[in-house]
């Protein structure tokens, strides 16, 4: 759409500061303004249709027109449109959701603490670790180990956990005490001839050395996404989590699972931890918890940790952590309805069925001249672009091949996000096999257009 004076695009450019956006590029290009949605599709202000191949930001599990969620919100709005959980106050949706969540998850947890976003959930995780270890007489046990290329959010603490440069550079981050161990990227970082198991052993050894260097008695927890999302849709290599967990257990370091993307059927099990054999101590959930119709997230923790916090309250007078909107009754009612829908419509069974087609279509793209590596689990996939597939040489970043491909996708009616050299795919869980075919047909056409431009402009030149 041309940017005319007083158009929505012009007013965007005049008034907004966009999150996670190349602001200089945005000034030139202007916004893509979505006006409505239906099923897996969104429609821009000109009425053009797009398949939302990333479910917004990995979150709109039930698509963009789920009436039961809308009704749940309206009903709660009419009853009690706002209330909080401070000073022991509660609302029925907050209590119902906590009970349902605890019942729903396969983890050894017994308490839910509600917040508004994945970042707040992971911030809360760190504060819980700090207070817990202080309370049990180990206040020096406070460092947190995350991984390079991890994404855990963008508040000051969550961005310290994140391992991606733009979220830290010139923000004075990471804060002290946040360490980053290796990113498990077998395709890019394995030595020639190294098996996945050998590569996992090498990464586990590296973690061991980090713990030894820092001192296990200074480290509280390790945080990981079961499958890494924003870092490039990276799946753990064989035996990786098995080896990592053994080291953590041996060193009395707790495991925080960030299920913000993987949670709720995304990877073909209800939780990513089940898919990859993780037994976490605490868990963060968000996004698909409410199909992202309203913001809500949660930290799930075990009873022994809760008991310690109760004792701390006796000493300090208060559990001094919480947000005004944490457990707000309207998003809580929507989240409760979302969990009900997952169960009654067997969304997990559906994901298991259609993900076969999704996996097949992703794998077929390995033959495309632009694609060096394909990976998928459940309805989560990544396509890594390479200038030279043979030598695994990426494109020179200044050529902006990823951005060109995303633009070609938009022309074809497909919304994706570039994650470094990788195109991330994470469609709504309700997608059908026919819609998966349509998605990949559009994507293939966009890849062909991009490949033609790469050849014409000789963008493979080293
Ligand atoms: C794995 C993971 N953790 C945490 C977050 C942060 O969530 P939010 O954007 O809701 O703060 C994200 C967001 O994409 C995420 O992918």
Image (tube, rainbow, N blue to C red):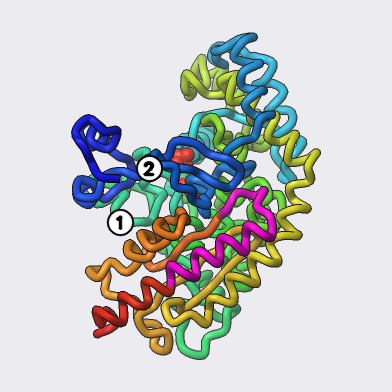
Q: Residue at 71% across / 36% down in the picture?
A: 339
Which disc, if any, is residue 165? 1
Label 1 element class:
helix
Q: Quick check: is the Cβ at mark 2 less than 8 Å away from ligand 1?
A: yes
Crowd around label 1: few <14 · some 14–19 · many ≥20 (10 Å): few
Label 2 element class:
loop
- 434 magenta-colored: yes
Rendered image quadrant of residue 288:
top right
- 418 magenta-colored: no
Would residue 295 be found to the left or right of residue 446 on screen? Answer: right
The residue segment tinted magenta is: 427-447
Instruction: Examine the rendering and report whether any part of residue 255 can be seen.
Output: no
Instruction: Examine the rendering and report whether any part of residue 189 can be seen.
Output: yes
Rendered image quadrant of residue 437:
bottom right
Would residue 104 be found to the left or right of residue 273 on screen? Answer: right
Residue extending farthest top: 79
Residue of label 2: 154
Q: Quadrant of the C terminus?
A: bottom left
Q: Residue at 40% across / 51% down in the picture?
A: 162
Q: Residue at 59% across / 66% down in the picture?
A: 376
């Amino acid at each position: 759409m041309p940017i005319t004076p007083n158009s929505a695009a012009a007013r965007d450019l005049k008034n907004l500061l966009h999150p996670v956006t190349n602001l200089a590029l945005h000034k030139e290009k202007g916004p893509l303004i979505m006006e409505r949605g239906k099923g897996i599709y969104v429609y821009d202000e000109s009425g053009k249709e797009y398949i939302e191949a990333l479910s917004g930001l990995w979150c709109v599990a039930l698509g963009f027109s789920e009436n039961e969620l809308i009704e749940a919100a309206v009903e709660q709005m009419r009853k009690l449109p706002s209330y909080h959980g401070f000073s022991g106050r509660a609302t029925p949706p907050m209590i119902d959701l906590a009970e349902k969540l605890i019942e729903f998850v396969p983890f050894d947890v017994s308490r839910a603490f509600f917040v508004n976003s994945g970042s707040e959930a992971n911030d809360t995780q760190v504060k819980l670790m700090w207070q817990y270890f202080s309370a049990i007489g180990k206040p020096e046990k406070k460092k947190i180990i995350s991984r390079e290329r991890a994404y855990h959010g963008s508040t000051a603490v969550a961005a310290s956990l994140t391992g991606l440069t733009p979220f830290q550079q010139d923000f004075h981050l990471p804060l002290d005490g946040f360490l980053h161990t290796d990113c498990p990227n077998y395709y890019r970082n394995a030595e020639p001839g190294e098996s996945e198991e050998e590569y996992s052993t090498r990464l586990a050894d590296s973690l061991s050395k980090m713990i030894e260097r820092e001192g296990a008695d200074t480290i509280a927890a390790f945080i990981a996404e079961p499958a890494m999302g924003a870092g490039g849709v990276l799946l753990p290599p064989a035996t990786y989590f098995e080896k990592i967990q053994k080291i953590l257990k041996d060193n009395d370091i707790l495991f925080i699972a960030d299920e913000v993307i993987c949670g709720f059927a995304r990877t073909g099990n209800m939780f990513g931890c089940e898919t990859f054999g993780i037994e976490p101590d605490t868990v963060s959930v968000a996004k698909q918890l409410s199909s992202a119709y309203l913001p809500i997230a949660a930290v799930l923790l075990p009873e022994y940790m809760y008991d310690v916090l109760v004792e701390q309250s006796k000493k300090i007078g208060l559990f001094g952590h919480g947000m005004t909107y944490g457990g707000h009754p309207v998003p809580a009612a929507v989240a409760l309805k979302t969990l009900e829908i997952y169960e009654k419509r067997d969304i997990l069974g559906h994901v298991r069925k259609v993900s076969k087609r999704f996996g097949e279509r992703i794998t077929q793209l390995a033959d495309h001249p632009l694609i060096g590596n394909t990976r998928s689990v459940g309805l989560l996939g990544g396509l890594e672009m390479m200038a030279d597939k043979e030598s695994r040489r990426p494109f020179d970043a200044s050529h902006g091949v990823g951005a060109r491909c995303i633009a070609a996708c938009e022309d074809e009616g497909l919304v994706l996000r570039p994650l470094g050299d990788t195109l991330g795919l994470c469609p709504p869980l309700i997608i059908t096999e026919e819609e998966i075919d349509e998605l990949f047909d559009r994507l293939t056409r966009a890849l062909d257009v991009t490949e033609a431009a790469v050849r014409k402009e000789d963008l493979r030149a080293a």
